[in-house]
Amino acid sequence: MRRVRAARGRGGRPGLAAATVIGALVLAGCGGSDSGSSGAELSVGAAYIPQPVSDSMAAGFLTITNDGDTEDQLTSVTSEAGDVTVHETVDGTMKEVDRLPVPAHGELVLESGGNHLMFEKLTQRLEEGETVSVELHFAHSDPVTVEVPVKAATYRPTSEHSEHTEGSEHSEGSEHSAPSEHAGH
């Protein structure tokens, strides 16, 4: 299986990330009853890219779940596979946006016919069975790396979201890998 990998900007220090998360959990446990918000607690699931018909463009879909008390925002997506933009669809019209909200105790669903990721200027043709690495960037949380499988062009998920994959939980400060989804336009 051929993989397209995105560069890691942090140099990959899982021990440091784990220590940071454990420290944050210990501190959260020490707070008083009025300690307030726990922040965003993000996880990613149901990710995929339908095999594109174009050599230069593809779409991506996924669901970002926030189990925390604070809203966050998806601000950008990067990948070595090509340029990635975030698109919003309103009344059947899509437009590029600079951010989409991830509500507290809610989900941001990127799906066919709705909000989605747009891959342009692909560095190579994406084929079914490959995996594309993307990094999701947020206004307040650390970036999340997701391994997104390329599915058949006709692929449709059995359920629209909540198909979290093993290892898909992401608490603020940790790294995560999960698949991503999006059908072509």
Image (cartoon, rainbow, N blue to C red):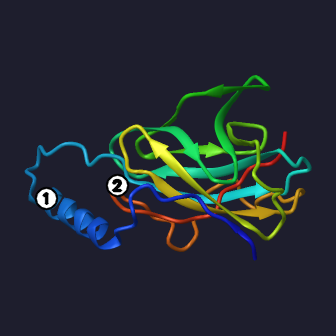
Q: Is 111 placed above or below 179 here?
A: above
Mark 2 neighbour class, 10 Å CA radius: few under 14, some 14 to 19, many 20 or more:
many
What secondary structure is found at the residue carrying circle 2? loop
Looking at the picture, how far across and down is residue 82, in whole percent? 69, 47
Apparent side of residue 43 relative to residue 151 in the rendered image (left or right): left
Looking at the picture, how far across and down is residue 18, in whole percent? 29, 70
Q: Is 26 placed above or below 121 here?
A: below
Looking at the picture, how far across and down is residue 52, in whole percent? 86, 52
In the rendered image, the residue lying farthest to the bottom is 1
Q: Quadrant of residue 174?
A: bottom left
Q: Quadrant of residue 128?
A: bottom right
* Alpha carbon distance from label 1 to label 2: 14 Å
Looking at the picture, how far across and down is residue 101, in whole percent? 50, 34
Which of disc 2 and disc 1 is earlier in sequence?
A: 1
Apparent side of residue 53 relative to residue 109 in the rendered image (left or right): right
Which is more toward the observer, 22 or 5? 5
Q: Is 33 placed above or below 19 here?
A: above
Q: Which mark is residue 172?
A: 2
Asked whether disc 1 touches disc 2, contact meaning CB atoms under 8 Å apart, the reply is no
Q: Which mark is residue 39?
A: none
Mark 1 neighbour class, 10 Å CA radius: few under 14, some 14 to 19, many 20 or more:
few
Q: Write the residue at 10% across / 53% down.
A: 31
Report the label total: 2
The amino acid pointed to by label 1 is Leu
Q: Write the residue at 57% across / 60% down.
A: 146
What secondary structure is found at the residue carrying circle 1? helix
Residue highlighted by disc 1? 27
Q: Write the residue at 75% across / 77% down.
A: 1
The amino acid pointed to by label 2 is Glu
Please state, as top left, top right, bottom left or bottom right, where the C terminus lies in the image: top right
Apparent side of residue 81 relative to residue 74 in the rendered image (left or right): right
Q: Quadrant of residue 84?
A: top right
